[in-house]
Amino acid sequence: MPKTDLLQGTLDLLILKILTLGPNHGWGIASRMRQISRDNLNASQGSLYPALHRLELRGDVESEMTPSENNRRARVYTLTRAGRRRLETENADWQRFVLSVGRILNAE
Amino acid sequence: MLEPLIASLRGLARRRAIRGELDEEMQFHLEQQAQAHIQRGLSRTEAERLARLEFGGVAQTREAVGDVRATWWDDVAFDVRYAVGAMRRAPLWTAVVTTTLALGIGLSTAIFGVVYGVLLKPLPYPDADRLVAIWNSAPGAYERFNVSGLNWITWRERARSFDGLALARLIANFNLTGGGDPERLQGARTSANLFSVLRVEPLMGRVFTDDEQRSDAKVVVLSYGLWQRRFGGEASIIGRKIILNGAAHDVIGVMPRDFEYPASQFELWTPLYLPPSTLQAGINNDYVAVGRLRSGVSVAQAQAEMSDLARQFAEEHPETKRPMGGLVDAKVDPLLESNTLQIRTGLWVLLAAVLCLSLIGCLNLGILLVTRANARSREMAIRVALGASSSRLQRQMLAEAIPLAIVGTAGGVLVAWVLLRVFAPALPTQLPRATQAALNAPVLAFAVGVSWLVVMLAALLPSRAAGRLQILAATQPGSRSITGGTTAQRMLVVAQVAVTIVLLFASALFARSLAGVLRVDPGFRTDDALTLQLAVTRARHPEDAQIATYYARIVNRLQGVPGVVAAGFVNRLPLTGIDQVGPVEFEGKPDLSLVDTDWRSATPGYFAAAGIPLSRGRLFTSFDTPDSPPVAIIDEQLARKVFGAQDPLGRRVRIPIAGQPWTEIVGVVGHIFNATPEKDIRPQIYWPESQRTQDRAALVVRTSGRPEAFTSAVIEQIRKEDPDQPVYDVRPFDDRMSETLGPRHLLTWLVALFGGASLLLAVLGLYGVVSYTSGLRMREFGIRLALGASRGQVRRLVLGQAGGLVLIGCVAGLVCAFPVGRALQSLLYKVSSADPASLLVAPAVLVAVALLASAAPAMRAARTDPAVTLRVE
């Protein structure tokens, strides 16, 4: 599996997971991600946006421009039913993947 | 398939909006992040700097999101814009390519329009594909022959394949008199069930009944056109009486506007009365039969049943086996086909020829696209090196062809529209429904389909070859490889040459056929003669003798007109396509079976008027009357066939029907080709009009001077004899000859035109490729010249290359020419399908023109100055 695909897929997975907590805008997702991972996942925040747009095109999230703090509008992303299903299957895949990698690494 | 397209189109519309919103979104992000840093105690400038750092490039993000949103549509739009730019930079090139494309598509579409209107468009009846025509058939002699009343009655009783079987006599004249100028109308006498077989209801009133048919009732159904034209479209026409052939007929119905059985010139229908005396086998084969297949019965099944019934009929009536070589079989054709048997092949050949022309245009387009791709090969190679997929490159070639396809289709439709408007009315009259040739939906679909196919083909051919072959060569700096893309070009040129050879070969075959037909002496003279047709109103002249004297009186009057050399009547004029065919038997020749002949009744002056020479004995005279001994004149062919070297004068001949008298042969005249100069069908026998009288007659007037000038004088003399006598089809005899040869002229000239155009296009392609490749070899030529090669040798090098391409193309073309010739065989006149002269002429013409075209690049190559070409780079 090429490296970029792994990372890209992982980012998608993380975004979907964070959106299960409720609709959020790009910055909110980025800070939540850093918060939960305790600053360990420190990709450039800009790379979040292509991923969000890709997810929207795929139908996993919906978005709407909504008024927000300090008189600005922000795009707020909401998880769709399809996105929730994708998260379930990809989460399961991810767990299996981590488990098998762990088994290999722990094998003597 | 459609979904991604719609999605991407929707994406296109949303993208502009999203781009603005994305900037807003990123701005919001940066401010929020900076705000968070300020709250942690950083200064505003420091916080904003850090926020931007953490975010990464704003511009890159914008690009990345753009890439996510981008669809194949963006690529296509880009490529199309690129192609339009390239077209603008090379306006001449673009003009040539789009014009060829538009002309090719326009010509093909126009021809297809005619093919569709004449051959394919369904007849205007419900379930028209179940309608069939049924013929008698004499295997080996007459593939299709009219049927008799007895055939119809018998078949109608026995045949199981049909829901209904109708009968019609299509040769029926009606002289309409009273309430306006006398007028001869063409109508059909039909069985009462014709309308139910065709499933057509009258617009007004009713159609006739079986009883009316059996009792010879004087009722008539009018066409919409006649009703409008002659009777002002008044509803009160139903129930009125009109005078046809001197007898009052009740108008009982009017047919709908689109009812045209059997053709558009038919204007009325009356009951077909079959007198019991005519219900004999073997004679009176005067009718056409049309049937509606029972549902589930195929044409082949009906054919099998009718063949059985025809054999059975022949067993029961042995006299059927005698005339026409034995009418012992039947033939069943779809009605639509039966109308177009004569001209089908010719039309398909024209369509094939014009498609060949379009193919050559397409190959030319391909060559030009390859050349352009070659010029860009380095750019392509770099793009491949940078990761552009090869399908992306192919897509680019296709996208570049899209503007061409659009312009070509639009131009082609325009050309086709003009051609159909201007030339459809000039089509030969032998094409039924030619007026229906129009730009309707199927024809437009054909135009669009062909043009897109042509352009895509032209774009795909080079993109496959060019994309693959050039990358290596092109990336080497200073590469002078002339293989690669030029291989594709050469193959395209060879293909062009091959197709052109086939078209030229076909043109030569047709040209030689036409020349052969024009050389034929038909046996009569069409120059300086006026012809017209008329039918006698029987009610005015009930006795045969009265008709004969009526004709004689008209001829007498005409001979008084200054400038009239000779005048005479005959019952069937040559070249009108209307025959009277019958067998005769000769006294004392029992060993000779019946001979099929053209039966003609003529007045004494006919032979001089038509220019038919007397070779022995005498012509008819005014002394041959109903009361004098019966006489006949035979033609030389019949004399030779029956009597050989013996003298036929004084021998006796008769129609082999009980009660017909033996008649003495008093003269022998020249043999003529009655129907067309292309076919010598059968010999002729003539009877005096006074002894075998016919209601229908044609008048031939030989004039000194232009025959048209005599039209009004001739009609005036006829009207003086009878003011109510309608005449029709008044034309110079020459006119009929050009009309008869019309389809052959059209076929020959159009195929020659397409052949010539192909030659031009193919040579254009050859010229392009030869100049292009010799342009690439300039340095090589420079070296050769510097090393001592003569200019003649360099010239030969270029000519040799061109010659090689042409040679391969010629060989390929000649190989294809054999099957093509065989397919055309039925359209050729006394020319073999592998005619050596045509096989020689086609490549000769092509080679000559090709060498002429390659002369210019060869000269240019020979003029190469080594000092200049070697210094470049």
Image: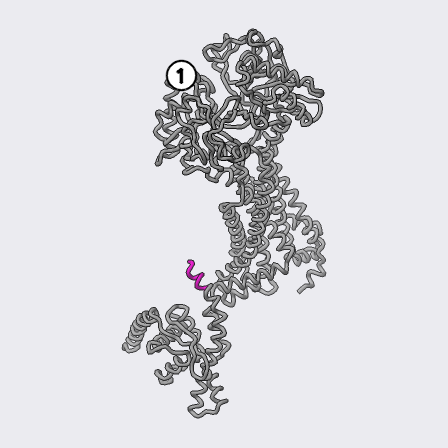
What secondary structure is the magenta-colored segment mainly?
helix
**Numbered disc 1: what chain?**
B
Badge 1 density bin: few <14, some 14–19, many ≥20, Cα 10 Å: few
Element marked by disc 1: helix
Mark 1, residue position = B318
| Residue B833 seen in this snapshot | no
Report the quarter where the C terminus of chain B lies.
bottom right
Residue found at the far front of this picture: B236
Q: Is residue B471 above or below residue B106?
A: below
Q: Is residue A54 left or right of residue B370?
A: left
Q: Is residue B756 above or below residue B74?
A: above
| Residue B385: x %, y % from top left | 52, 66
Q: Is residue B238 magenta?
A: no
| Residue B791 seen in this snapshot | yes
User: What's the residue at 63%, 47% (across, down)?
Assistant: B763
- What range is drawn magenta here? B1-8
Report the quarter where the N terminus of chain B lies.
bottom left
| Residue B558: x %, y % from top left | 66, 19
Indicate the amino acid at tag 1.
Pro
